[in-house]
């Protein structure tokens, strides 16, 4: 896809001919600037035993929203920290109830866990509504209109179907979750829609699983060869001492052999963990590119020229840098991700100004029927 917003071959039939203009997103934040916000947020959240985390979330979102620009205007985050704090207190209360239940009996713990699972779709709805309603561009708020029964289908029934089919149905469950999330979001009064397909989710799932299997086999073969090279059978036999007169006595192993054996086991563990992360990041890179190339809002289309391999490299290198810096690279990692993704995305539109003006009129006519008094910023 080129910079002018022209569409790839084979997709023209699904796009209106008049959608020829491309309004690009941009991101103006930088790592050093955000680090100052992040470190203060971290310090005050620790100092207040997590209470300040609600204000930290608002500061962070306002920074990223305020540095994200589309067609000359920046986004706004309008949430109140108090609303987020109330939501988090409810979340903590639910967790405490579950923990306390577990101290009495396994059955009570299972019942409490089941109740929490049944509450999850409601929590998702509240979180989406809160976040959308408190996000705005050009003075027009976003919204989320997802229903309760569709939420239970998306977040409980379809994942259960994926588990019962031994994972075969999980890509389809993720497809249904994606459709629920996107198709129920709106800008002003215009609903968004996604043209992503279940087949697309299966394709990227197969690629991700293939990457995992390939890397797992490589790790297993490397571990087997290394073990055979480091610990030949004769050395293992000489390093193990068994008392023939007392078969029940503990087996003694030469510490000189045990130390490298444990080291090899630890390296194998981290190699498997890295394999999981790599396949997971591959999934996320391909999913993001696919999903954010198939979103429509009235006559407008979200498009991107994101390279899945490059985005994958950003994700995996960010994780490694965060690990080696003991978390201190986190602000730069978040900014680095935004600085790549947002400039690679644009809105394909015929007349954005006319669309926004129409939405402003419609929103004004509908009024703001939802009071902020009952907003709860329950995080997900």
Image: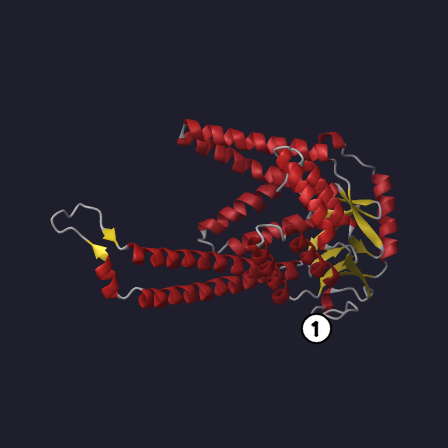
Residue that mark 1 sits on: 9
Question: Which image quadrant: the C terminus?
Answer: top right
Q: Position of residue 202 (x, y in %)?
A: 54, 61
**Residue 164 in the image, given as x and y percentages of width and height:** 45, 49
Q: Is residue 144 visible?
A: no
Q: Nearer the viewer, residue 305 or 187?
A: 305
Quadrant the N terminus occupies: bottom right
Above-or-below relation of 36 to 21: above
Quarter occupied by residue 351: bottom right
Which residue corresponds to the image point at 18% horizontal and 52% vertical from the top-left?
Answer: 242
Residue 86: x percent and y percent? 66, 31
Question: What residue is rendered at 59% in x and 51% in y?
Answer: 176
Q: How is the image coloured?
A: secondary structure
Q: Secondary structure at mark 1?
A: loop
- Which residue ends up furthest to the top in the rendered image? 104
x and y percentages locating residue 342 in the rendered image: 73, 58
Residue that extends furthest to the left in the rendered view of this protein: 245
Q: Is residue 272 left or right of residue 6?
A: left
Q: Is residue 139 visible?
A: yes
């Amino acid at each position: 896809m080129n910079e002018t917003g022209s569409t790839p071959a084979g997709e023209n039939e699904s796009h209106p001919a008049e959608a020829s203009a491309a309004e690009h997103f941009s991101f103006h934040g930088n790592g050093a600037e955000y680090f100052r916000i992040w470190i203060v947020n971290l310090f005050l959240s620790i100092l207040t035993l997590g209470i300040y985390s609600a204000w930290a979330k608002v500061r962070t979102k306002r920074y990223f929203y305020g540095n994200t620009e589309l067609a000359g205007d920046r986004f706004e985050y309008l949430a109140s920290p108090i609303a987020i704090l109330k939501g988090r207190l409810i979340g903590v209360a639910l967790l405490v109830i579950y923990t306390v239940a577990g101290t009495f009996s396994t059955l009570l713990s299972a019942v409490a866990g089941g109740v929490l699972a049944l509450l999850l779709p409601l929590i998702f709805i509240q979180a989406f509504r809160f976040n959308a309603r408190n996000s705005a561009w050009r003075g027009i708020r976003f919204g989320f209109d997802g229903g309760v029964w569709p939420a239970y289908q998306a977040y409980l029934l379809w994942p259960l179907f994926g588990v019962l089919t031994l994972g075969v149905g999980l890509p389809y469950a993720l497809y249904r979750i994606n459709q629920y999330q996107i198709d129920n979001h709106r800008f002003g009064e215009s609903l968004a829609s996604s043209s992503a397909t279940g087949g697309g989710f299966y394709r990227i799932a197969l690629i991700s699983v293939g990457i995992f299997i390939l890397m797992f086999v490589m790790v297993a073969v490397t571990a087997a060869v290394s073990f055979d090279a480091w610990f030949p059978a004769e050395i293992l036999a000489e390093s193990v001492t068994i008392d023939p007169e007392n078969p029940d006595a503990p087996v003694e192993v030469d510490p000189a052999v045990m130390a490298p054996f444990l080291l090899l086991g630890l390296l194998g563990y981290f190699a498997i963990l890295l394999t999981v992360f790599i396949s997971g990041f591959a999934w996320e890179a391909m999913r993001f590119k696919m999903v954010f190339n198939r979103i429509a809002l009235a006559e407008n289309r979200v498009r991107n020229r994101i390279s899945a391999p490059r985005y994958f490299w950003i994700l995996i290198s960010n994780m490694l840098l965060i690990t080696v810096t003991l978390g201190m690279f986190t602000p730069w990692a978040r900014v680095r991700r935004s600085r790549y993704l947002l400039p690679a995305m644009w809105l394909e539109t015929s007349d954005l100004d006319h669309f926004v003006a129409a939405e402003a009129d419609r929103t004004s006519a509908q009024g703001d029927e939802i009071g902020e008094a009952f907003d709860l910023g329950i995080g997900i």
